Amino acid sequence: MVDQLSKIVPVIMAGGRGTRLWPISRSSRPKQFLALAGRDSLFQETLQRVADSDQFAAPVIVTNEEYRFLVAEQAQEVGVELGAILLEPAARNTTAAILAAALYLKDKTDDDQVLYVLASDHKVTADAGYTDAVVQATACAEAGELVTFGIAPTESATGYGYIKQGEKLESGGHRVAEFVEKPQLERAQEMLDAGGYYWNSGTFMMPRDVFIAECERLAPETSAAVGDAVAKATADLDFVRLDKQSFEQAPDISVDYAIFEKTDRAAVVPSAFSWSDLGSWDAVWKVGDMDAGGNVARGQVTLSETEDSLVYSDSAHVAVHGLKNIAVVVSEDAVFVGDLNATQRVGDIVKRLKSSEETMALTETHKTSYRPWGGYSSLVLGERFQVKRLFVKPGKQLSLQKHHHRSEHWVVVTGTAEVTVGDKVELLGENQSVYIPQGEVHRLANPGKIMLELIEVQTGSYFGEDDIIRLEDEFGRS
């Protein structure tokens, strides 16, 4: 971690479990960690917008335990060093998350700082308009205001909250005159026609100590609970674990409701850059690279006589003919097809899937699961056997472990495997295999320079991940 403190500290919220982009986004790997509209994930794009060390300090990330290695790995992939990764033991919304980062930073230095609070799952074009908005918001925050970025609306959208600008402030920006919840279409059109209204982007610039003081004044329960959680926090590898018992006492409330709608310091900076919260598949379509027919295609896709549609596949080849205004989204184990203009209702489908034991897993995990050492894909699951594809990154190793209910056969497909079985350690090359008896201590490592791939055949009575008894683990999971 970079021990660097400067005036503007990015605070990136990366703990959301949103499933509105199902079936690609799921609770085990939600949209912020996916490359939905570019080469890098949305989280990585957010990191790169605040990577200028002349302007920003090393970012502080607030996430949960399940995503901790994803955060660290994706930051490393784009070469952005982090100031801290705070782990929330429970979901308590944005007030608690931002306050935890503010209090953590206050413990590090008495010098006041400006916090630049960003969501990790928004799509932003970092052009000249973006730079101008950041500069203006910084000046406004330095004058003691709690600033939200207001995005100039381009349509009468009903999926966003709105902010009405009030009087002009000397420091730049405007006083907030009114917050408007997600409106009906008629009201949204009225605001668009009237002017002076902006989409609430959920992005903030604020003086650290002013925000802490306003939380103490306006949200005392949150202030007390989060204060205790930070005071009792513990270090775990490169992570900071907030105290579970204290943090769970914090109310589940957004910073908009708890602070911004109550404070007399709320300001809005009108911002003229391209922004989307990518809250639905039609939003992904709008920011995508469209062909002459208005289609956005990603993955293995063939289109014929199709218009104004989104077709997204991360597995099978998809061919679409003779349709208009549709969304087709294909993952490894599920397919969504619907009216592109109604994709904001995908959440209703997810709720139905979650309500059934037979389909609940489709909302939580993919067939491919990622781990700090690599990951695995489930290929076949039978009554007393399971077949997986394992992939291990160069220089990484799994935990030293054993299983009570299954034995395993490993066949190396690509790369070199260092295999520990009991007291024996051996190297295996392509097409070589090894057997791990039930209950035997074992470990798999990749000592090579390329990705190690294996086929794993498990046989036994139970294949749950909770049958992994870790004896040693470099990732702190034993």
Image (cartoon, rainbow, N blue to C red):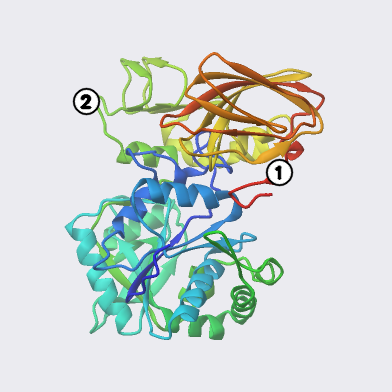
Along the line of sight, the residue nearer the viewer: 476 or 84: 476
SS for dot 1: strand
State left or right for residue 214 relative to residue 268. Answer: right
Q: Residue at x 30, y 84 (%)?
A: 143
State which tag comes first along the sequence, 1 or 2: 2
Q: Residue at x 51, y 42 (%)?
A: 20
Along the line of sight, the residue nearer the viewer: 384 or 93: 384
Residue 292 badge: 2
Provide residue 224's location: percent of width, then percent of height: 63, 80
Residue 470 badge: 1
Amino acid type of disc 1?
Answer: Arg
Where is 357 relative to 197, above or below?
Answer: above
SS for dot 2: loop
Provide residue 116's location: percent of width, then percent of height: 37, 68
Total numbered circles: 2
Where is 414 relative to 263, above or below?
Answer: above
Instruction: Look at the image and tell me whether residue 27 can be seen.
Output: yes
Where is 400 relative to 47, above or below?
Answer: above
